Amino acid sequence: MSAEIVRLADSQIPPAAATLARAFHDDPLMIYAVPDAVERTRLLPDVYARMIRFGVLTGEVYVTAGALEGVALWLPPNAKWTRENIEASGMHETATLIGNDAYQRYREVVGREWQARERDMTDACWYLFLLGVEPDRQRRGLGGALMRPVLERADKERVACYLETENQRNVAFYLKQGFEMIVNGEEAGGSGVRFWTFRRTPKR
């Protein structure tokens, strides 16, 4: 499928967040953090809006042109998780938004992933923070198209890329995009949530 990919406009943050909320509604990490499906439907759009605003401030966010059917949020090499950008995006209010217990469950998993990233990815890289496609538009090539602008730039600039997923069904997709697996289904603490990490070396 050929899709035109463009940079996110500020006015598209709400619909982009809604797309990610639907894409990740049944994601193992989100189910673990917010077990109630009705609560996930209510809370996730605001959670992802804050992440997208952080991406706009710190990295690059890409969406499908026209009908917004997918979102890719990349953080560039040496991106800084500064307090200024975290507060400006509203991400510092996530615990208040979803509740402290849910936030601690979320942190339990992403904290373990962060440790793996710090351990395994010591050189500068593009980090795929989020990639999501509308559920009824998945498996049509949109995910690969959304990744392509940064993958092509990373190849040109000879920079690696890195990502993680908590969904095993994504493993084959990322391998197809030229990534190599590093962590294979490791459980994050006692959460029961498994995660996979991937590195993509620049292609000639």
Image (spheres, rainbow, N blue to C red):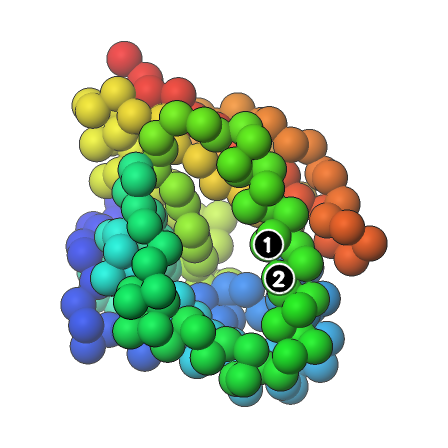
Percent of width and height locating residue 95? 56, 78
Q: Relative to 197, is 59 on the left or the right?
A: left
Residue 160 sits in quarter: top left
Query: In the visual, does 148 lie left or right of 21?
Result: left
At a point 49% along the width and 48% down the height, the residue shown is 139
Visible residue check, residue 45:
no
Residue 102 appearing in the image: yes
The amino acid beneath tag 1 is: Val
Q: Which residue is mark 2?
A: 107
Task: Tell me which corner region of the image, top left, top right, bottom left or bottom right, holds residue 126.
Answer: top left
Image marks 1 and 2: residues in contact by CB distance under 8 Å:
yes
Other residues around mark 1 within 10 Å, as few (<14) / some (14–19) / many (≥20):
some
Checking the image for residue 110, the label placed there is 1
The correct choice, above or below, for 97 with respect to 105 in the image is below
> Rounded to the nearest whole Å, what is the CA distance between mark 1 and mark 2?
5 Å
Specify the label residue 86 is tagged with. none
Of residues 4 and 34, which is closer to you in this image? Answer: 34
